[in-house]
Image (cartoon, grey):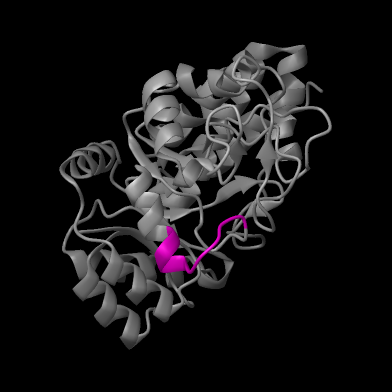
Amino acid sequence: MLAAIFGLSGLELTDAERGFFREADPAGYILFGRNFESKDQVRALTDGLRALHGRDDVPIMVDQEGGRVQRMKPPVWPQFPAGDRFAELYRLAPISAMQAALLNAEAIGVSLAEVGINVDCLPLLDVRAPGAHDVIGDRALGEEPMQVAALGRAVLDGLAAAGVGGIVKHIPGHGRAMADSHKSLPVVDASADELERDIAPFATLSHATMAMTAHIVFTAWDAARPATLSPKVIEDIIRGRIGFDGLLFSDDLDMEALDGSVPERAEAAVAAGCDIALNCWAKMDDMTGIAQRLGTMKPQTKRRYEAACAALGNPGGQGRLDELVAKRDELLALV
């Protein structure tokens, strides 16, 4: 199995994609707005992907956070609130905020499972820092590590209740970045002691089965390389200090924070210690290049991958979306 996640070009598989995916055997797939039109169409797409592999637990991912990062949009799917709504409620009523976050995540999970999606790139555990770039902004669950961890745990539990796995991100933390890593490489000069705040939520939730890296240079740890490409950050901080032993995805390798070709970036990320290279944009030249550069999964990656897949429920949805949203909105109305 290839240690990569690939995107798809459109609403259905092309013949070229079908043939390539069957031969390359990637670890899974990620969907974007270009892949969504109707529930029946998405279900047919995800069923087709699983048929290529002959198993039901193939990870099929999406970024469905709510707020401004939502790939499945109205009117077909509900508009979900951004993370800041739950952070605002937490300041008034922490227990109610955690319950609202759980209900919201379960509602997201139900809407995903209904169309055969079993992994969401959520929750953000980035501790928002005052004055930082708004690429995180209202997506964050707060500015206090304990609050972020508490709400993040609720999100993981809500997704799991719907049979959907959550990916904690952007480990070891994107909250201090003064630039958007989609456009350029952020450099964080905070000291190792200061960065304890950033890694605290990830350490609290280190039992999570999946995490996604940050394309950020942390000069206190490795001044030469972003976390995604840094053996030191991955081994000493993510695996060591944080204690995360789950499946580690790179963030999207098409982002402009990184140098080199996309296949070169994928090779470097896996060499640095990422388990899975994430390639979102369905460019066949990039995908074939990644397949040529990456070998089969390492034994420890295979172990983590199998554990992550085993934690995924059976996609299918519970038919409780309206009830979950109504209960969530009652709680959010407190502020």
User: Residue 206: percent from the left, percent from the top?
Assistant: 41, 23
Quarter of the image with the N terminus is bottom left
Foreground of the two, 88 or 260: 260
Residue at 62%, 29% (x, y): give it: 327
Q: Magenta segment range?
A: 257-265
Q: Is residue 79 left or right of residue 116?
A: right
Quarter of the image with the C terminus is top right
- The quarter holding residue 331 reads top right
Q: Is residue 214 among what the camera can see?
A: yes
Magenta stretch containing residue 227, yes or no? no
Q: Is residue 257 left or right of residue 41?
A: right
Relative to 20, say whether 2 is above or below.
Answer: above
Q: Is residue 316 among what the camera can see?
A: no
Relative to 54, say whether 328 is above or below.
Answer: above
User: Residue 272: percent from the left, percent from the top?
Assistant: 37, 45
Foreground of the two, 251 or 266: 266
- The quarter holding residue 128 reads top right
Residue at 56%, 72% (x, y): give it: 34
Foreground of the two, 269 or 318: 269
